[in-house]
Image (tube, rainbow, N blue to C red):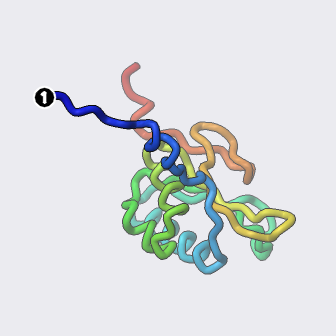
């Protein structure tokens, strides 16, 4: 006995999350504090801040999240689904995340940075540790 399946309706119901998420200044502060503590605990260079005036609130940073627990990061952002999508993609692709402030609206966004490239904050991404081995 065979069972026919209908797949025509299912294709139109798939929704994709954006890889850019809006965050608040409080979430940014939580992320920065957590990254600084984890960088010190792990002895890794996880966080890179844009060079310049330390008192300027441009909310620009770049960070590695591939060594951090996704659940701990999600808790910092009150389990926002858009933020979790960005963090999950960054961990899966070993890319960096970055934050920046949008010039017109003033919103702070969290997005995928880059892998081995210079990101929008003017900082170069760190290379994964195991790339120095055999080729």
Q: Looking at this view, is 130 or 61 the one in front?
A: 61
Residue under label 1: 1
Residue lying farthest to the right in this orientation:
104
Q: In this view of the protein, can residue 45 be seen by the observer?
A: no
Taking the image as shown, residue 86 lies to the left or right of residue 124, namely left
Residue beneath the point at 44% across and 31% down:
131
Quarter of the picture containing the C terminus is top left
SS for callout 1: loop
Residue lying farthest to the top in this orientation:
135
Residue lying farthest to the left in this orientation:
1
Residue 9 coordinates in the image, percent (x, y)? 46, 43
50 is higher (above) or lower (below) than 80: above
Q: In this view of the protein, can residue 72 be seen by the observer?
A: yes
| Label 1: how many Cα within 10 Å (few below 14, some 14–19, many 20+) | few
Q: Looking at this view, is 122 or 86 the one in front?
A: 86
Residue 18 coordinates in the image, percent (x, y)? 60, 53
Q: Looking at this view, is 134 or 119 the one in front?
A: 119
Residue 54, by quadrant, is bottom right
How many numbered marks are there? 1
Residue lying farthest to the bottom in this orientation:
26
Residue beneath the point at 56% across and 56% down:
63
Residue beneath the point at 65% across and 38% down:
117
Residue 116 coordinates in the image, percent (x, y)? 59, 37
Residue beneath the point at 80% across and 70% down:
106
Residue 73 coordinates in the image, percent (x, y)? 45, 66
Q: Looking at this view, is 113 or 85 the one in front?
A: 85
29 is higher (above) or lower (below) than 51: below
């Amino acid at each position: 006995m065979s069972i026919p399946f209908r797949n025509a309706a299912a294709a139109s119901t798939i929704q994709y999350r954006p890889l850019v998420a809006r965050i608040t200044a409080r979430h940014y502060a939580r992320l920065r504090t957590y990254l600084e503590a984890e960088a010190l605990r792990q002895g890794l260079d996880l966080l890179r801040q844009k060079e310049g005036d330390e008192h300027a609130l441009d909310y620009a940073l770049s960070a590695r999240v591939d060594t951090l627990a996704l659940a701990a990061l999600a808790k910092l952002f009150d389990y926002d689904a858009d933020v979790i999508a960005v963090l999950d993609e960054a961990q899966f692709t070993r890319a960096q995340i970055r934050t920046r402030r949008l010039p017109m609206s003033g919103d702070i966004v969290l997005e995928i940075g880059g892998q081995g490239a210079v990101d929008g904050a003017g900082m170069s991404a760190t290379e994964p540790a195991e790339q120095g081995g055999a080729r």
